[in-house]
């Protein structure tokens, strides 16, 4: 891998990086078991496997001291009352953090620790979010028409642990309420 | 220290973070021995100890897995033909990288390895710069009137090694030429 310094641009408003090593598309089928309203989930999936979010990755060696970076784009939409969101994960090396910088859109980062602490932070353009070590994180797009776009960076050795979240979801859900987004307890996490 | 997730904004165009734990001001006197034209340097310093650059830091534990973040603001100006710049440094833990995101202004990041490899990358708004492990780095503001403003993040355990650079400067200088900025060899580094 090239070990020279390099730059890339995040051209607005499209924000797709000028350098991309990997493009991930996550569709509705990849979020099986994650949305609260499973009846609506299966009904939607039977009609179309919609694109929920995309990640453009800039690759670096997956070792301590390096950073993995990229752009996350969560598309607008809902499954029942629940907004489209990423799968969300812990880092395999739990004691590693992550930085997000919101470039476009609006939404939330839903977070929790293995001990059950929870935090939900609002995202909007120009905001930096610091996810300290130990906090699982999932981004949620709450705009009706606009993508939620964030730039992210995390340590090269962090890794991803999806399994813990896949089993029961996050402790907090973000639902579309009468007066805007509502943060509610996930009834599956008692 | 608070271990909850947190957000802060980088409000444009001022870009001073909404949360700041430490504010550093570096004046001309702090860059003793760094500018090529030492006669002009001492002449300027005898009149006024001008502000060259500022750093707004968001503090975190200085350990592996955390990130240290902040905003760097290099003001426009020159010492002779050489543009205002930061002191520049290696990381004490050499195998650690750094990310910059340029928010405003124009300039360059001047970089080099202990082995003598050099790299100079242009900075402008919307550009992300990746400084791989082992590369010392210094930012240079080349606009005539506007600050060079970057957001930076680096591993909590990286540390700073200023001494190596203070002894002989970087191998490349950024000078104001007839047709814009010129990258030239530093005659002190043979």
Image (spheres, coloured by chain):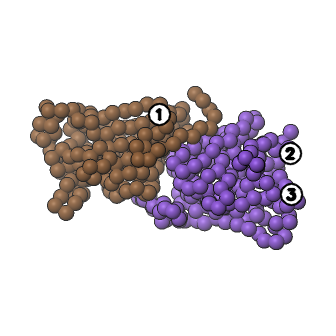
Chain colours: A purple, B brown
Q: Are marks 2 and 3 on the same chain?
A: yes
Q: Position of residue B74 (x, y in %)?
A: 32, 44
- Which label sits on residue A160? none
Question: What residue is drawn where x is 72% and y is 57%?
Answer: A84
In this view, the residue in front, A104 or A29, is A104
Say if A131 sits above or below B109 in the image: above
Q: Are marks 2 and 1 on the same chain?
A: no
Query: What residue is disc 2 on?
Result: A188
Please give the chain letter of the residue carrying mark 3.
Answer: A
Q: Could you tell whether B38 is left or right of A144 in the image?
A: left
Q: Position of residue A75 (x, y in %)?
A: 66, 61
- The answer for how far apart the CA atoms under marks 3 and 1 are is 44 Å
Badge 1 element: loop
Can the viewer see residue B143 in this picture? yes
Question: What residue is drawn where x is 30% and y is 35%?
Answer: B26
Question: What residue is drawn where x is 83% and y is 52%?
Answer: A36
Q: Could you tell whether A109 is left or right of B184 in the image?
A: right
Q: Position of residue A21 (x, y in %)?
A: 55, 65
Say if A79 sits above or below A154 in the image: below
Query: What residue is disc 3 on?
Result: A38
């Amino acid at each position: 891998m090239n070990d020279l310094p390099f730059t890339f641009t995040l051209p607005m408003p499209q924000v797709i990086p000028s350098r991309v090593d990997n493009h991930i598309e996550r569709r509705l089928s990849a979020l099986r078991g994650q949305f609260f309203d499973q009846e609506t989930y299966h009904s939607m999936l039977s009609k179309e496997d919609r694109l929920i979010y995309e990640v453009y990755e800039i690759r670096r060696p997956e070792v301590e001291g390096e950073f993995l970076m990229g752009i996350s784009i969560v598309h607008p939409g809902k499954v029942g009352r629940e907004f489209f969101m990423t799968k969300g994960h812990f880092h395999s090396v739990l004691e590693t953090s992550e930085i997000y910088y919101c470039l476009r859109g609006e939404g939330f980062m839903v977070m929790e620790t293995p001990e059950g602490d929870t935090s939900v932070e609002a995202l909007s353009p120009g905001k930096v979010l610091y996810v300290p070590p130990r906090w699982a994180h999932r981004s949620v797009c709450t705009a009706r028409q606009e993508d939620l776009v964030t730039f992210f960076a995390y340590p090269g050795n962090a890794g991803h642990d999806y399994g813990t979240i896949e089993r029961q979801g996050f402790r907090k859900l973000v639902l579309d309420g009468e007066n805007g987004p509502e943060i509610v307890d996930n009834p599956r996490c008692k």
